[in-house]
Amino acid sequence: MINLYIGNSTNAIYCTPDENTDAVITFYYFKFVNRITQEVVQMWLQNISTKKRNQKFSINVNTYFLNKDGGLWSYTIQSSLQNIVPTSAILESGLMYLHTNLIAPVKYNEQVNTFKTYNG
C-alpha cells in the first residue's frame, strides 16, 4: 500500500510495474480513484530508480491532492509515452491511503519527580 501525506511537498513511491513487462519504460501513467467519491487524479511520472528490482517515483502530493478527500484510493499503473495517453495494459494495481492532516503527537506535562520519603 502506498501512503501519501498532504503537507509534505514531495513523497517517494516505490512499486514494481516492470515485473509485468519486458519493455524498457521510463514514463508511467498513474490513475488514482477515490474509493468513496470516485474522484479521479491522473499523472505521468518518470522512473527515477537506479535499480531493476523496484521502480521509484517522486510525486509532489500538494500539486495533485491538496484539496482532495483523504482516505482510501485505488490506483492503476500503465506504461506511457511522455505525457501522452497510456500505451499498454495495466501493469500494476493497488491501494493508496491519502493522509490529509499530519496529527501532532500528544505531549503531556512532565510529572513531578520529587517524592516525600520517610526513613525510619
Image: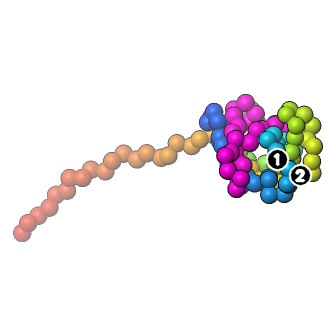
Q: Secondary structure at mark 1?
A: loop
In this view, which residue lies farthest toward the left? 120
Three-letter amino acid code of the residue under disc 1: Val
Q: Nearer the viewer, residue 40 or 53?
A: 53
Asked whether residue 59 appears in the rendered view, the answer is yes
Image quarter of the N terminus: bottom right
Query: Residue 75: where, in percent of width, then height?
Result: 82, 49
Q: Nearer the viewer, residue 74 or 51?
A: 51
Boundaries of the magenta span: 40-65
Query: Residue 49: where, in percent of width, then height?
Result: 68, 45
* Quadrant in which residue 117 is drawn: bottom left
In this view, which residue lies farthest toward the top? 63
Residue at horizontal 66 percent and vertical 43 percent from the top: 12
Q: Nearer the viewer, residue 83 or 70?
A: 83
Q: Is 37 above or below relative to 65?
A: below
Residue at horizontal 85 percent and vertical 34 percent from the top: 82
Residue at horizontal 88 percent and vertical 37 percent from the top: 81
For residue 113, the mark is none
* Quadrant in which residue 87 is drawn: top right
For residue 24, the mark is 1
Q: Secondary structure at mark 2?
A: loop
Check if residue 52 falls in the magenta segment: yes
Three-letter amino acid code of the residue under disc 2: Ile
The answer to whether residue 116 is left or right of residue 88 is left
The answer to whether residue 118 is left or right of residue 66 is left
Please name the residue that numbered disc 2 is placed on. Answer: 90
Q: Give the class, few, some or many, for how many residues have Cα within 10 Å of label 2's Cα (few <14, many ≥20).
A: some
